[in-house]
Image: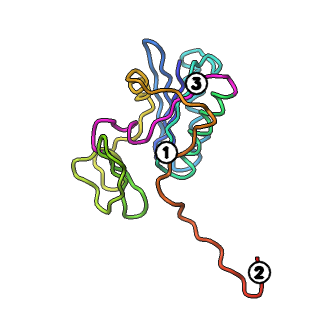
Amino acid sequence: MIVALSTSSPMVGVALIGDNWSRVAQEQSSTNASGVCLKLLDELLSEVKMAVSDATAFAADIGPGSFIGVRVSATLAKTMAFALGKPCYVASSFDLIDPNSVVSFPSKKGEWFVREPGSEVVRVTERPKNSVGFGTGVENPVYPNPLRFGELIAHGLEPVDPFAVVPEYLIEPSISTPKPIPGVHA
């Protein structure tokens, strides 16, 4: 069983992927992605009467996405993989939305990340009308779905060393640096 996690968007998702079965649980969460993720994982494991230690691999959505959200799935998956000596897989939010379509979702205020299949990610100020994804004004939102890891792995996605699992932000953080205090030298 593969335990797959996605916390890069406002929709937290957890999937369990077995040989001939799968389960997924998703829940909207603008805060506490880690708590929601662990709750959903516990619920799914109870449903299939298995434990985390039964996992054969772990998978993480590494973003881009919300700063803290992306860190949650990356940290949880790599920690469990390392602790249990299991492989770890990673995929972008784009591939977990739809690896074969133009995908867009919010980047920063008024901007969108956009990726066409086979192309680099760009940031634009207008969401392409032919894209799938989520964000303000999107009528039929599509969020990263951790179940897609099953397809990606079946099509050749290779595991990575758990220590190599890091979030992919694609933009600089939206923080300001402290201003110097007159008379105080660093």
Q: Residue at x 54, y 25 (%)?
A: 3
Name of the residue lying farthest toward the bottom: 183
Q: Residue at x 77, y 87 (%)?
A: 183
Q: Position of residue 176 (x, y in %)?
A: 58, 70
Secondary structure of the residue carrying tag 1 is loop
Q: Residue at x 73, y 87 (%)?
A: 182
Is residue 7 one of those drawn in magenta?
no
Instruction: Give the amino acid at mark 3.
Output: Pro
The circle on residue 185 is: 2
Q: CA distance from mark 1 to mark 2?
A: 39 Å
In this view of the protein, which residue sits in the foreground, 178 or 34?
A: 178
In this view of the protein, which residue sits in the foreground, 119 or 175?
A: 119
Instruction: Give the amino acid at mark 2.
Output: His
Instruction: Give the residues drawn in magenta, as a range.
Output: 83-102
Instruction: Give the amino acid at mark 1.
Output: Ser
Q: CA distance from mark 1 to mark 3?
A: 21 Å
The circle on residue 87 is: 3
